[in-house]
Image: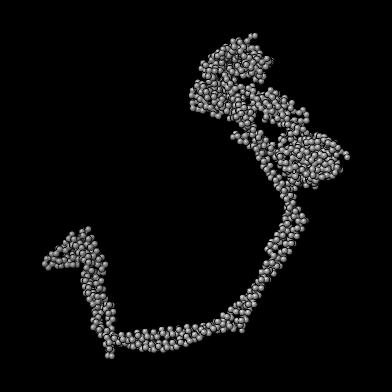
Amino acid sequence: MPPFRFIHASDLHLGRRFANIPQPPDGNIRGRLMEARHAAIGRLAQAARDHGAHHVLIAGDTFDTATPSPHVLRQALTAMGEDAGVQWWLLPGNHDNLRDAEELWATLARDAPANVHALATPEVRQMAEGVSLLPCPVTHRATGRDLTAEMPGTATPEGDIRLGLAHGGVVDFTEDGAAIPPDRDRSARLDYLALGDWHGRLTVSDRVHYPGSPEQDRFKHDRRGGCLAVTLGAGAPEVAEVETGSFLWREAELPLLAEQDADKALRDALPATGRRDILLRLRATGWARLPEQVALTRAAEDAAPDFAHFELRSGALGTLYETADLDEIDRGGALRLAANALRDESEDETRAETDRTIARAALARLYAYVKEDSA
Amino acid sequence: MKLRAVTLENVRRFTTPARIDGIGDGLNVLCEPNEHGKSTLFDAIQALFFKAHGSRDREVKELQPHAGGAPQVSVEVETEQGLHRITKRWLSKPLAEVTRDGRLIAQADEAEDWIAGLLSGGQSGPAGLVWVRQGMTHLTAGAKKDQEQALEARRDLMSSVTGEVEAMTGGRRMDMALTRCTEELATYATATGRPRAGGPWKAAQERVEELTAARDQLSETARALHDALRSRNRSRRELSELEEPSEVQARQDRLAEAQQAFDAAQGHARKVEEQERAVAAARLARDHAVSRRDALQGALAEQQAAQKAVTEADAAAAAASDATEGAEEKRKQATEDLERAKAARQSAAEVLQRARHAQAARDGAARRKELLSRIEQAEAARKNLETARAAARHGPDAQTLRRLEDLAQALATARATRDAAAAQLVMRYEDGAAQVTLDGAPLPDGTSVAAPHGGRLALPGLGTLDLRPGPGGAGEAEVEQAQRALAAALEKLGLPDLAAARTAAEARQAAEAEAREAASLLDAHAPDGIDPLREALAQIPQPQEETDDLPPLPEAEAALSTADATLAEAQSAQATASDGLSEARSRSASTQAALQAAQDRLARAKQALEKLGDTTAEALATEVAQAETALTQASGTLATLREQAPDLASAEAHLKRAKSAEENARSAIARLRPEIAALDERIRQGAGEAVEERLAETEQELTAAQADLDRIEHEVALLNRLKEALESARASARESYFAPIAAELKPLLQLLWPEAELTWEDAALLPEALVRDGQEEPIRILSGGTQEQVALLTRLAFARMLARDGRHAPVILDDALVFTDDDRIERMFDALHRQAGDLQILVLTCRQRAFRDLGGRALRLESVEG
């Protein structure tokens, strides 16, 4: 029997709008991010062709919500239907669960092209000759139970490859019993368990994998999205990662030291190429003197327009008050009195943290005014 | 600190070293034309004190000559420690050093610290120098009217007053920082700290509110969608359960079964009903037999009783009839007796009447005669009385007559009086002389005749002699008046003269006497009038014809009394007899009625018996027994039937339930189908509107908007905090310096303008107005000269304040008095001289002529060789 090849993907979240990403008035980052999600369909199809596979399994959350807008749905189905040689197997996830998205799945069953299969029931599907697919559609947003529990008892034709498809976590964070046991492949005699829900790539075991989202949507996983090209033959499955994501979401720490050149440190932390497709969040930590903070802010303002999205978070950055820095505000007199009062307040541990933060920010602002004026 | 010398090298035009030497205590004047480098000197000194040697900023670079090079400035200052030389070089090979007595005591940053210490005498102390830069005193308010600019101008004024204390109040930099801070804050908040309409803060707040509302609405819509989905699921499940074929069959079976049971129960119930009717009929028959038997027995007994009653009543009626007849006879006798007694009494009464009449007629004859005579006389008297009274009403009465007499008397008196006054004629006839007449009347002899009116004397034989009285005859008027009064009184009485009046009065008197006489006569005969006499006469009966057969009166009276007694007896007897009769009659009537009743009763009894036909008591008893048996049997059958009856009510309830179950199922199906269709439509619509997608988007937007709002609020908070810190620092700095300055300023102002005073704006701590001779002049309308004088004096005051603290600060004035006229400059210099007693003042000026003679030590800026 020839090896069985397929693409394992999950969490496309089509229709996600990224309203949480600030968009400058003349920018269109949200549109680009949405567009990239749609483009992932084509990339997955391409990955299938490259891999010599005829099947794409999407382990849940194909759509971001239970009610995607009609054109999102329509265009997704049309894109999937473009290559009749690729069969799409769509599993309801928690975002597009059966109950909330009943209408969506009904529409899919009715309107989807012939090569798109909506797995709205848990019955075994014959994907190909000798290959049985055991889908576990998510019925509710929070099921509270392990949907793969029935798998061990599900019969398939003797000698068939048993391919499990499910959506959910393997670690029970909420302890509601909804987690999928990590050894479900063994207990249910599965040749491969294709999982979804986790947006990052995760290997649970040889036969149990999370491919992550094909197009990232958050600062968490620090790599571009992708899918898995799986080959099931004799022995352990061959699982190859295929990068499909166009945007890189990166969150990085920018540790600063007191005497460091903040401007340079920031510039060094920036990627040299591909900035337009990078969403970068830098979290400045450590300590910096007032002038360095000003320099850091200016450097960030300078760099930001290069990126799809750029933000500098300096809440965790402590301020060092050198006498010389305060001297730059003024050596004495009322300005210095004000600066001293603000510094004392920011260092006064008996005060509320918010007051101290505000005092610190006020002092930095005063410094910035003085520097601006003398510049 | 006191300045002693300044050396410049490579400072602007001074490419070769130049030096001012011998700066003394008190007032020093460097008087040079323009472009001789006074401002350069000023800037150089300022740079030395305030620009770090490492600085490369604009102000430092401006010190550089065109040719380039490192500007270097040295200043010799005298302090309590001795004479120091401070040298600074900038830009290339920067240098800062302080030497004392040629010995290096500090260099580089140490030297800077030394300088700072010299200036401040502590971190927040004042500068050691007081500067007045050229033009800094110039206020633009004279030319520009804009209030805000005037304020800024005054701020400049004061900032330059305190300018050199910038280290103290922050001065311009402080103003700048505050302005920036306020400006930035103003984009967010109003003056009261609320979000400004149209500003980003308000916008962010509104955005959050908007998005929250949108989010709430969308989640409500999404919830409705979910509800619809759940409802549809439920409805579908319900429908499929209802339409399940086995379920439908079971429902129908249950219905058929219940129907059958109900029909059976109903049939039995009908049988029971029939039997109940049979029992009722049997009971009716039995009751009928019993009543017929009882009726017969009753009728027989009644007939016997009635017969007996008739017999008894008959006897009683006959006896009563006899008694009635006897009583009638008795009454008839009594009635006759009564009639006779009545007639006897009638005749006795008539006899007595006539007897009494006759007696009365005899008794009244004498009295009648007397009465007739009295009436006759009384009537005659009354007639006389009337006549006399009529006569007495004519003629004057005594009083009237008396008044007439009085009038006549008055006339006589008047005439006498007149005549006495008038001419008197006394004729003494000769014997035989012809009779002389006066107005026809013979004139008596020897008698005085008055001729009040004159008159004509006929003197026979002689003619006539006319006497004419003089005018205004005395008493004539009185006579006429008296005559008129008498005539009027007489006329009123209708009498011609007094004599007639007297006659009439007499006649009247006589009539009155006659009337009185007649009245007393009438009174004697009829004291109560004549009518009572006539009535008394009428009472006396006319005498009648005498009859002889009349008995005497007492006899007649006794006869009548006897007849009365007889009559009373007869009446009583008759009443008794009538009563007896009436009683007998009524007894007879009641016995008759009793007889009639008894006969009726008998008739009825007979009738009743006839109605019962010819049946017998025995036959009826048998009939009763038979009916009783039939009833017992029927009741037994009914009891058995009842015992066997199935429960109809429960069978009916069962059927009802089965029917309603079927009905419910049917109506549920009818309800569910359209319901599901409606839900289908609603869900399709909700899903088509991409509710969840929009909800997710709105939630993300809300999070972002909230973060934005938080950021802005943080920004506002920090700006507020900064503003507050700056304002409080400035306020406290000002408080510590302005009050003493104001105190020092007052005597200085009064040097120029006696009784002048500056008022200060509370909020801005700026001079507001100059008060001279009670006139308050806002600073901005003062002349340029006055303004600069105020500014200058303010600086002097500041320096004085420092000096008073034991910290001498040189006052450097760089052409500070451009607008001031020469006269005023002189007075200013008086002030300066006066100040110079304890201050070092360095005046840089181009006004050589004006300043030449003002005293003070003259300084020269001289090139230094090598």
Q: Which residue lies at the image location 68% right of the left edge and 15% below the top edge?
A: B92
Q: Can see residue B424?
A: yes
Q: Locate residue B407, reporting x and y percent.
A: 22, 64
| Above or below: residue B84 compared with residue B412 | above
* Quadrant where the image shows the C terminus of chain B: top right
* Quadrant where the image shows the N terminus of chain B: top right
Q: Locate residue B676, reporting x and y percent.
A: 74, 52
Q: Which residue lies at the image location 67% right of the left edge and 26% below the top edge?
A: A287
Q: Which residue lies at the image location 47% right of the left edge and 87% below the top edge?
A: B318
| Above or below: residue B577 compared with residue B680 | below
Foreground residue, B181 or B825?
B181
Residue A299 vs residue A135: left or right? left
| Above or below: residue A262 compared with residue B86 | below
Q: Can see residue A119?
A: no
Q: Extreme left residue here?
A: B431
Image coloring type: one colour
Q: Locate residue B97, reporting x and y percent.
A: 63, 14
Residue A146 vs residue B460: left or right? right
The image quadrant that residue B669 belongs to is bottom right
Q: Extreme right residue here?
A: A1
The image quadrant that residue B787 belongs to is top right
Foreground residue, B487 or B265?
B265
The image quadrant that residue B463 belongs to is bottom left
Count of labels in the image: 0
Q: Locate residue B88, reporting x and y percent.
A: 63, 15
